[in-house]
Image (cartoon, rainbow, N blue to C red):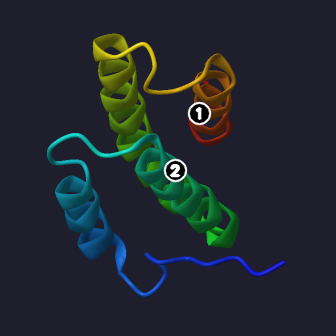
Amino acid sequence: MDIIRKYRKLDWFDFLEFVEKELEGEPTCKVYFEIMDEICVRKLESISEGATYKLKAPCLDLLKRFEQRVSKDDSYATKEEIEEFKALVKSITKR
C-alpha cells in the first residue's frame, strides 16, 4: 500500500498556511481527513514533547471547523466519519 502525503514537503508554518487556504470556502470531508492524517503522521515522526504540543491547537481548530461544517449540512459526513475524525483528534490531543 502506498501512502501519498501531499503536504509532506511543507515545513510547519507553510503547512499551517496551506491548511488555511484549503479550508477557505466549503472543502469536502476528504480534505479534513487528509489534513488530519498529515497531522497524525507528523506526530508519529515527532520525537519531542514540544512538537507534540504544537499539534494540539491546529487539531482542535480543525475539529471545530469540521463540526461547524457538519452542523450546517447533516449529509456532509456520515456518523462513522464524524466519530473517526473525533477519534483522530483525540489521539493527538488526548482529550
**Amino acid residing under circle 2:** Met
Q: Residue beneath label 1, please?
A: 85
Q: Which mark is residue 13?
A: none
Cα distance, mark 2 to mark 1?
A: 8 Å
Q: In front here: 30 or 46?
A: 30
Q: Give yes or no for contact between labels 2 and 1 (Cβ–Cβ under 8 Å).
A: yes
> What SS does tag 2 mark?
helix
Relative placement, left or right, of 78 versus 73 is right
Q: Residue beneath label 2, please?
A: 36
Q: Quadrant of residue 28?
A: top left
> What SS does tag 1 mark?
helix
Image point (38%, 30%), residue name: 66
Q: Position of residue 3 (x, y in %)?
A: 70, 76
Relative placement, left or right, of 7 versus 37 is left
Q: Quadrant of residue 93?
A: top right
Q: Position of residue 21 (x, y in %)?
A: 17, 59
